[in-house]
Image (cartoon, rainbow, N blue to C red):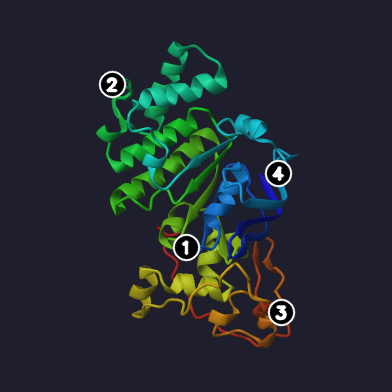
Amino acid sequence: MKLEDWSVSFDTAEGTVEAVRQVSLELFPGEVLAIVGESGCGKSVLCQSILKILPRTAKTSGRVLADSADISGYSEKEMKKLRGPFFAMLFQDPMTTLNPTIPIGKQIIEAIVKHHKVSQQEAKKRAVATLDLVGIDDPAHRLALQPHFFSGGMRQRCVLAIAMALEPKVLLADEPTTALDVTVQARTLDLLKEVKEKKGLSIIFISHDLGVVARIADRVAVMYAGKIVEIGKAEEIFYDPRHPYTWGLLASMPLVAIETGVFGGIAGLPPTLLNPPPGDAFAYRNQYALKIDYEEMPPMFKVSDTHYAATWLLDPRAPQVEVPIKLKRRESSV
């Protein structure tokens, strides 16, 4: 899957909100691409726009390529054929996906029958196998249970089962572990990795928690004010970050506070996207900002073949700035 100059805006009473601005990225087969950033930076809108599940006030431009086909202009009827068999989505709160009055098994079977046109008996067999795949014990018995019989972590597994029952190629996971406690969160991340390996799944994983991202991501895209400001392999983003915004995100991690004895963060608030500022949108919060940051948007500078960052500090004419965040490598880390 690939995005080319993808933008999303919303018409509001106050004006046009530019929620996603000219995002270009590629999701490779079998990888986990994490998109990180503060709340309101456009992560969820980006995912929802790919599936075309945004309000009618949304407008999009650019291209979305799925198996080389440009689906950006697809109708709702055409998108329904892709949702499930090609794309699946995992939301933050499983109860926004599950019907609380209908047994879990019936919800999985309904999706299978609708898209694969198989008998109820065959669909039930597949539902049992899918629940087993996501780690639900005694799946044949639990098909008949409503969602309220399950814990939060198990409900998220049930939602994943519905998604995986149609054997999609791409899973869009929108902060799927945020509402879970730490131990359940870890098990859910391990489950996603296990399912990815078994099914050859490609995953876009949305999160504001870099600690979670470090556990699962192959590559990381850092998003700010609707734009991708840095992208690279996970080890490049964590151990060789180049954008000041990435430095701020890393500085706010508890791990860094433990190592340095100082809890960092990012001063100020993100800009309104009703009228994004000229130049680099992060300039007004960036202690390393140059004069040009307030005037001209930086291009994506190449750090390596897999690592790019949109900051004027990478321009050969820029003054040298020592990276303030240096994480120690650990065998159990990224």
Label 1 crowding class (10 Å Cα cut-off): few <14, some 14-19, many 20+? few
Residue 103: which disc? none
**Alpha carbons under labels 2 and 4: distance apart:** 42 Å
Element type where label 1 sits in the image? loop
Mark found first going from the N terminus, 1 or 4: 1
Horizontal side of 311 relative to 88 (left or right) equals right
| Amino acid type at image mark 3 | Asp
Element type where label 3 sits in the image? loop
**Alpha carbons under labels 1 and 4: distance apart:** 25 Å
Residue at 50% x, 66% y is 238
44 above or below 299? above
Q: Are marks 1 and 4 in contact (CB under 8 Å)?
A: no
Q: 71 or 158: nearer the eye? A: 71
Q: Which residue is mark 2?
A: 141
Residue 315: which disc? 3
**Alpha carbons under labels 3 and 4: distance apart:** 34 Å
Residue 72: which disc? 4
Label 4 crowding class (10 Å Cα cut-off): few <14, some 14-19, many 20+? many
| Amino acid type at image mark 4 | Ser
Residue 158: image x %, image y %?
38, 34
Mark found first going from the N terminus, 3 or 4: 4
Q: Which residue is mark 1?
A: 39
Element type where label 2 sits in the image? helix
